[in-house]
C-alpha cells in the first residue's frame, strides 16, 4: 500500500518536473524570439556605449536577486508611437497606469471611469496601460487576448519582461522611456496604480492649473522619514545588502505621483546611473535625492494612501484614494459625475 503510494508520488513528481522543464523551454524560446529590439526604438537619451557596457556587466556578475536588470533594452511588444499625436499636440497630462496582463476587467472599468481621456474639458489627456509579459503557463492565450483588447482600445503598452510585483520599477522606467521617445513634450506625467480612485478634474484644475506657468521640477509628495523593512517575506522587504542605509530618502507614495514632464526626463537620465531596486517609489526618491529635487507637498487630504468611504463632496475635493476596488469604482461613478451643487 505504502509502496504503491510512493511509486505514484514519484511518477507524479517526475511528470511535474518534465512539465516544468517543457514550459520553461517553451517560455525561454518565446522570450528570446521577442528579444530583438530594433535600434529605431531606442530612447534618445540613452548613450549606446554606456548602455552596452552596463549590459555586459549583467552577463559577468551575479547580482542580488532583487536588483533589477536595468538599463537594458526591453522591447515594446505592443506600442502606440502616435498616441501623443505628434509634437504639436502634446498632452497636458500623460497618465501611465501600472497594469497586469490578466487584469482585463479592471482596465475596462478604468476606461469607463477615471481613465476616460475626455473627462476634463479643454485639456488634452492621454492614458496608457503599462504591462509586462503574462505568466508563462497561459502566455500565448493571454497574449492573443491582449492583442484583441488593444485592437479595440489602442491603449496598451506592453514591455518585454515578466510582469511581477518585483519588476514594477522596470515598468515605471519603461513607461518613462516611452514618454522620452514618443511623448517628450507632455507637460505632466502621472504614474498611477490601478487599484485607486482618481479625480483627474481636481488634479488638473486645482493642482496643476493649465492656465498658470508650468511648474518645472514639480513632483507631488507624501512620505518622509520612512525606514527600510528588514523582515524577510514582507512585501516591502529590503535586504540590507541592497540598501545598507537605515533611512529612505523623501519619496512619493507609489499609489500615484505627478511629475512635470521635464523632471520625468531628468529622473529617467538619473536612473541610468543609480542602482535599480524593486521598490519603485523609493527608487524614484533616490533619483530625486541625486538630482537635489525636493517633492512639493500636496494640499492636505488630497492624496489618500488609505481607503476612504465614498462621499460625493469629499471625493470632489481630492485627487487619489488608494485600495479602491474596481467594482466599487463602477458603482460610485455615476454619482460622482452628478453635478455638484451643495458642497
Ligand atoms: C468618456 O466620456 C464621454 C463624455 O465625456 C463619453 O461620451 C464616452 O462614452 C466616455 N467613454 C467611455 C469609454 O466611457
Ligand atoms: C523580471 O523580469 C525578468 C525578465 O523577464 C525576469 O527574468 C525576472 O525573473 C523578473 N524578476 C522578478 C524579480 O520577478
Image (tube, rainbow, N blue to C red):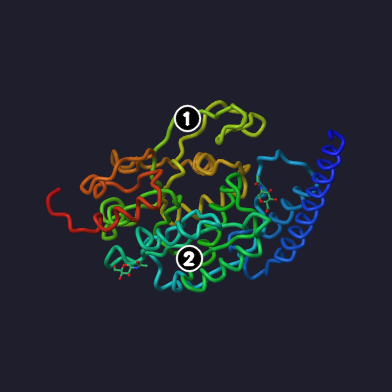
Q: Quadrant of residue 228?
A: top right
Residue 222: x and y in percent read 39, 38
Mark 1: few/some/many CA within 10 Å (<14, 14-19, 20+) = few
Quadrant location, the N terminus? top right
Q: Residue at x 27, y 68 (%)?
A: 122
Q: Residue at x 73, y 53 (%)?
A: 55
Residue 188: x and y in percent read 40, 57
Position of residue 156 relative to residue 59, above or below, is below
Q: Which residue is mark 1?
A: 226
Going from N to C along the chain, the mark reached first, 1 or 2, is 2
Residue 69: x and y in percent read 67, 49
Q: Quadrant of residue 24?
A: bottom right
Looking at this view, name the residue that lies furthest to the left.
342
Position of residue 325 relative to residue 35, above or below, is above
Pick whichever, 192 or 44, lies toward us.
192
Looking at this view, name the residue that lies furthest to the front.
1
Q: Which mark is residue 139?
A: none
Q: Quadrant of residue 308?
A: top left
Q: Which residue is mark 2?
A: 183
Q: Is mark 1 within 8 Å of ligand 2?
A: no
Pick whichever, 212 or 18, lies toward us.
18
Residue 25: x and y in percent read 79, 57
Position of residue 83 relative to residue 250, above or below, is below
With 156 as the anchor, is 211 left or right in this view?
Answer: left
Mark 1 residue element: loop
Q: Residue at x 27, y 66 (%)?
A: 121
Numbered disc in front, either 1 or 2: 1
**Alpha-carbon span between mark 1 and mark 2:** 33 Å
Mark 2 residue element: loop
Amino acid at each position: 500500500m505504502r509502496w504503491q503510494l510512493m511509486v505514484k508520488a514519484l511518477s507524479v513528481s517526475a511528470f511535474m518536473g518534465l512539465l516544468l522543464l517543457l514550459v520553461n523551454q517553451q517560455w525561454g524560446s518565446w522570450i528570446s524570439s521577442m528579444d530583438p529590439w530594433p535600434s529605431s526604438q531606442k530612447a534618445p537619451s540613452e548613450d549606446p556605449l554606456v548602455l552596452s557596457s552596463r549590459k555586459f556587466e549583467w552577463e559577468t556578475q551575479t547580482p542580488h536577486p532583487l536588483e533589477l536588470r536595468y538599463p537594458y533594452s526591453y522591447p515594446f511588444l505592443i506600442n502606440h508611437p502616435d498616441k501623443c499625436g505628434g509634437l504639436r499636440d502634446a498632452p497636458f497630462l500623460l497618465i501611465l497606469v501600472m497594469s497586469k496582463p490578466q487584469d482585463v476587467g479592471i482596465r475596462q472599468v478604468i476606461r469607463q471611469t477615471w481613465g476616460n481621456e475626455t473627462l476634463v474639458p479643454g485639456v488634452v489627456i492621454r492614458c496608457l496601460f503599462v504591462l509586462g509579459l503574462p505568466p508563462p503557463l497561459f502566455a500565448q492565450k493571454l497574449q492573443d487576448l491582449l492583442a484583441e483588447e488593444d485592437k479595440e482600445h489602442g491603449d496598451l503598452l506592453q514591455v518585454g519582461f515578466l510582469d511581477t510585483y518585483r519588476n514594477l520599477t522596470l515598468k515605471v522606467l519603461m513607461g518613462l522611456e516611452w514618454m522620452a521617445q514618443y511623448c517628450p513634450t507632455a507637460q505632466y506625467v502621472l504614474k498611477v496604480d490601478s487599484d485607486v480612485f482618481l479625480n483627474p478634474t481636481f488634479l488638473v484644475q486645482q493642482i496643476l492649473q493649465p492656465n498658470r506657468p508650468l511648474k518645472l521640477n514639480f513632483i507631488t509628495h507624501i512620505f518622509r522619514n520612512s525606514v527600510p523593512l528588514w523582515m524577510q517575506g514582507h512585501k516591502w522587504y529590503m535586504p540590507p545588502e541592497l540598501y545598507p542605509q537605515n533611512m529612505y530618502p523623501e519619496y512619493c507614495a507609489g499609489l500615484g505621483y505627478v511629475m512635470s514632464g521635464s523632471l520625468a526626463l531628468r529622473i529617467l537620465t538619473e536612473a541610468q546611473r543609480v542602482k535599480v531596486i524593486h521598490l519603485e517609489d523609493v527608487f524614484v526618491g533616490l533619483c530625486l535625492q541625486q538630482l537635489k529635487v525636493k517633492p512639493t507637498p500636496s494640499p492636505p487630504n488630497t492624496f489618500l494612501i488609505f481607503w476612504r468611504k465614498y462621499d460625493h463632496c469629499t471625493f470632489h475635493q481630492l485627487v487619489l484614494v488608494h485600495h479602491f476596488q474596481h467594482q466599487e469604482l463602477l458603482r460610485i461613478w455615476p454619482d460622482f459625475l452628478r453635478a455638484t451643487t451643495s458642497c
